[in-house]
Amino acid sequence: MFTEFDVIVCVIMLISVLVSFMKGFVKDFLSLFAWIGAAIATLYFYPFAASFMEGLFKSSRIVNITAIISAYVISLSALSLINSFIYGNLKEFQANMSDKVLGIFFGLFKGFVIISATHFIIITIAEKEPDWLVDGETYELTKRGSDIITNLSQNYLEKGKEVIEEQGQMEIEDITE
């Protein structure tokens, strides 16, 4: 049975493919690289940002949230500037039809990651999988992607926790306090 979630999946896939086609593979890949790179950089720069923010805010929750957001935004901005420089020097790839066709395939991959992450978030938040998710035509596809994210996230969350605790002045549980 086709559910509302299936409609959302189709819309996300369509938008992802169209955006990737219009931007082209190289530009879209560099953009995704910046977002992921910023997330990784945030793990490393969070302790420094948190120690700086401690002097500005009294609440540890505000300190942690502000430090994470600040580290991410600054990292994303820096990587985006680097991407602009790189893309500007790759003139032969700009508006190239093969780059745009490769963008379609990259858009499919990116859309799959987005819908898989959405499924992952839903099952993480919900106590049980909602009927509208399980009954959908796209359930098996999004479930498979969600399982991959679950396996990957367990490894990366452990590594992230180790990095924060090695560099950081606080235990990982302190982030949510």
Image: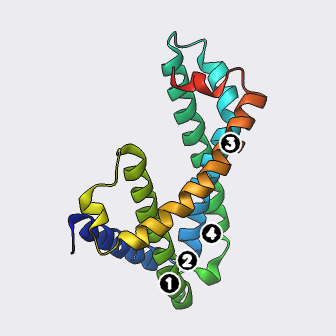
Q: CA distance from mark 4 to mark 2?
A: 14 Å
Label 3 amino acid?
Glu
Label 4, secondary structure: give it.
Answer: helix
Label located before the other in sequence (3 or 4): 4
- Residue denoted by label 3: 158
Q: Nearer the viewer, residue 170 or 54?
A: 170
Mark identifier at residue 88: 4
Q: CA distance from mark 1 to mark 3?
A: 37 Å
Q: Residue 10, located in which quarter of the rendered image?
A: bottom left
Q: Are marks 2 and 1 in contact (CB under 8 Å)?
A: yes
- Residue denoted by label 1: 100
Label 1 amino acid?
Lys
Label located before the other in sequence (4 or 1): 4
Label 3, secondary structure: give it.
Answer: helix
Give the vertical position of 114 relative to 124 (above or below): below
Label 2, secondary structure: give it.
Answer: helix
- Residue denoted by label 2: 25
**Label 4 environment density (alpha carbons within 10 Å; few <14, some 14–19, many ≥20):** few
Q: Nearer the viewer, mark 4 or mark 2?
A: 2
